[in-house]
Image: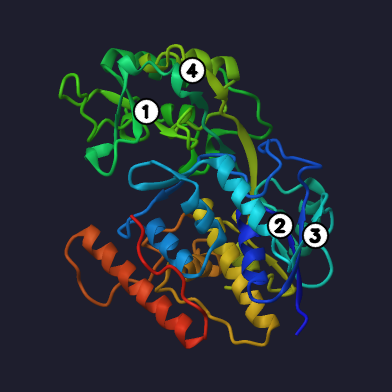
Amino acid sequence: MDAHVTVVGAGLAGCECAWQLARRGVRVTLREMKPEKKTPAHSADGFAELVCSNSLRAEPLHNAVGLLKAELRMLDSLILRCADESRVPAGGALAVDRAAFSAMVTAEILKQNSITVVPGEVTEIPDGEVILATGPLTGEALSAAIAARCGQNGLHFYDAAAPIVSFESVDMDRAWFASRYDRGTPDYINCPLDEAEYRAFWNALRTAEEAQVHGFDDGGVFEGCMPVEVMARRGEDTLRFGPMKPVGLPDPRTGAEPWAVVQLRRDNAEGTLYNIVGFQTHLRFPEQRRVFSMIPALANADYLRYGKMHRNTYLNSPALLDRYYRLRTEPRISFAGQMTGVEGYVESCASGCLVGIETARRLLGQPPLDFPKETAIGALGLYVSGGAVSGNFQPMNINFGLIAPLDRRVRGKREKNEAISRRALETLSALLAERGETIHRKEETP
């Protein structure tokens, strides 16, 4: 059967979707507006550009995103394969050299004979089978075309990225390498503040001058990617229970936990770039330098990228999409990635993976996999397509609350989560075997 699909957008979801379609024998036309045109959040020409953090978050199976990554590895995810091959040390998390990661994904896509890449902006929904994975910064013309198809305006919130500094500019006499509770390897740079330093920093941060973002207010932010200055305005100790939490990070010079700690995570394989963990911001650039220099170890930091904020558009998916991320009123049109309301790199990849697999199976005359709620990938799709019953749909990271509970009691949160993960992987393995799908890379990674 000569099946063909147009995938619009070569981000994480679009590349994963195109990969899953192509490896099943479906011809793909991949439309990508870069390098001819870039959004305010993008700077590189390659596919799968990571514009915010370089972390794909936790690896262990007692964490829901760790389970989701394990499932994606079983499904031969291109994104996870490239992430594993471009990883940089990050304790118990999977972080990548973003330039190497993008280059690997781009190279793999370009060498697939079944994928034809067509550059240039798409302003209308293409004919035929189409998957829209254009992300939170979908262009105005295509956004209008989507809104016209959906019969309503898309929703939106605002997303922010954290600054990146050079390693050589960090004052290591005032910082040290460690991971929280000494778990894993000592991969984070920890920059301490005493009580007086913290209070001065907090006061400066909450009153610093912000860049103008049209339509932005504190109520329009996504809780999982909140600007640090918005967090500061919520209370004096909010940061100390959030990104500046000192617990499990004793200062080796004193043996005591500092009043607050700012962590830096490696951003490239060479270890020359570090991003400020949890410091997404939309302060004016001079204000970022002024306020963040109040962190003693960053007093003379060299900023290679300042933090910035951008628009993030997503659909009211429960009213519009089915469990395969297809538009209910016009099933030839599917969506993938953040615009569906999944939040996070891994979740975007998972949506693209599911859409690619299920679309290929439908076009090839095979029964759907219908990933169940006992799996993370299935639970996420079911949430997006109707799990939000409150009428106030919000973007969602994967979490164990979305996955079907166990039918037995397990003592301890960590033990219960690990049991849910084991059941999920067993369920997915049995499903793939039953449907004739090849199982890949089943083993858990460290």
Tell me residue 348's x, y (percent). Answer: 56, 56
Q: CA distance from mark 2 to mark 1?
A: 49 Å
Q: CA distance from mark 4 to mark 2?
A: 48 Å
Which of the marked residues, 1 or 3, is nearer the chain's N terminus?
Answer: 3
Q: Residues within 10 Å of mark 3 (few under 14, many from 20)?
A: few
Choose between 245 and 76: the one closer to the eye: 76
Q: Residues within 10 Å of mark 4 (few under 14, many from 20)?
A: few
Which mark, by number, is residue 68? none
Q: Which residue is mark 1?
A: 235
Q: Is residue 405 above or below residue 91?
A: below
Q: Residues within 10 Å of mark 1 (few under 14, many from 20)?
A: few
Q: Secondary structure at mark 2?
A: helix
Instruction: Tell me whether circle 3 and circle 2 mark residues in contact (CB < 8 Å).
Output: no
Tell me residue 316's x, y (percent). Answer: 62, 59
Q: CA distance from mark 3 to mark 4?
A: 41 Å
Query: In what quadrant of the picture does the C terminus appear?
Result: bottom left
Kindly indicate the quadrant of the structure image that contains residue 338: bottom right
Instruction: Tell me whether circle 1 and circle 4 mark residues in contact (CB < 8 Å).
Output: no
Tell me residue 66's x, y (percent). Answer: 38, 57
Q: CA distance from mark 1 to mark 4?
A: 13 Å
Kindly indicate the quadrant of the structure image that contains residue 158: top right
At 73% across and 67% down in the image, what residue appears? Answer: 113
Q: Which residue is mark 4?
A: 207
Q: Secondary structure at mark 3?
A: helix
Which of the marked residues, 4 or 2, is nearer the chain's N terminus?
Answer: 2
Q: Which residue is mark 2?
A: 110
Q: CA distance from mark 1 to mark 3?
A: 42 Å
Q: Which residue is mark 3?
A: 148
Which of the marked residues, 3 or 2, is nearer the chain's N terminus?
Answer: 2
Q: Secondary structure at mark 1?
A: loop
Amino acid at the residue labelled 3: Ala
Instruction: Tell me whether circle 3 and circle 4 mark residues in contact (CB < 8 Å).
Output: no
